[in-house]
Image (tube, rainbow, N blue to C red):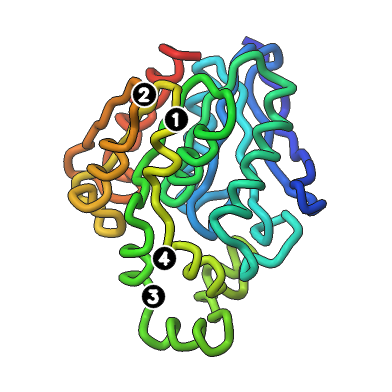
Amino acid sequence: MAFMEKRKVFFKNSRGQKLCGILEGPERAKAGVLLIPGYASGKDEWFSFFADYSSVLNKAGFLTLRFDRSGIGESEGDFAESTPETELGDCMAAYKYFKKMCDSVGIAGHSMGGVLAVMLASRVRAKALVSSAPPAAAAILWKELFTDKQMKEMKTEGKTKIPSDWEEKFGIRFLGMKYFSALEGFDIAVYAGNVKVPTLILYGTKDETVDMNVHAKPLYDALKCEKSLVAIEGDGHDFKSHRDKFFSIAAAWFKKYL
């Protein structure tokens, strides 16, 4: 199987902002997987998660595209101005760009990217979906993640400073109140109920960020398509303990439906 060189690509969202992605995989792949990173994360996701994810899918015969949403990494924009809907627009732009290269496209997302993957699958004609560690009850999660000081800053200043390691890795300086405010009325069921493609939901049983006991049921129950829920015993949010198992399950799902 001949592989193309890893290519940096650029495309624009509906707001005219230039987004950056990494395209890699077999030269003549008929099927591909669009990879959507987590909240405030880009194509170079923490712990090389998406680079490894992409590599496994490439070896399985799929072309992949992983990208930075607006205001992240090498993409234009101000992340403090983003909301789930603006990020969905970025995902739709990436899907439209990627669809020109593949006859069949699957969608994979992790964490908040897993929620965005569900949102995207409700709007486009993909062939399969894998959502890992999605925080279906997102407003609850965000209240747990932000400190009282950060919440006060966001309410008074409209944004709060991000930890330095996020700035170094993804080029993000501030988190914005617009995103948090949008989550207050967010309902994953509105989107999940419109997903028509075979959908695999994956959680780690030891995920301390997104507790599957809180988040799995509302998403799974809302899905009316062919679906499967898999819990990987003993694993955490980034599936570091059983990453090979995670990748094997995800790749098998895409092999079955793409």
Where residue 122 appears, x then y in whole percent? 50, 34
Q: Earlier in the sequence, mark 1 or mark 4?
A: 4
Kindly identify which residue carries mark 4. Answer: 184
Q: Residue at x 74, y 48 (%)?
A: 19
Report whether 123 appears left or right of 21.
Answer: left
CA–CA distance in space, label 3 to label 2: 34 Å
The residue mark sitting in front, 3 or 2, is 2
Hey, what amino acid is under mark 1?
Val
Q: Is residue 30 left or right of residue 146?
A: right
Q: Quadrant of residue 208?
A: bottom left
Residue of label 3: 146
What is the distance, in whole Å, between disc 3 and disc 1 at their CAs? 31 Å
Packing grade of label 2 (10 A; few <14, some 14-19, many >=20) is: some
Give the residue number, with chain letter if any, for mark 1: 195
Q: CA distance from mark 1 to mark 4?
A: 22 Å
Asked if labels 2 and 3 touch by Cβ distance under 8 angstroms, the answer is: no
Left or right: 90 as drawn, with respect to 183: right
Q: Nearer the viewer, residue 72 or 96?
A: 96
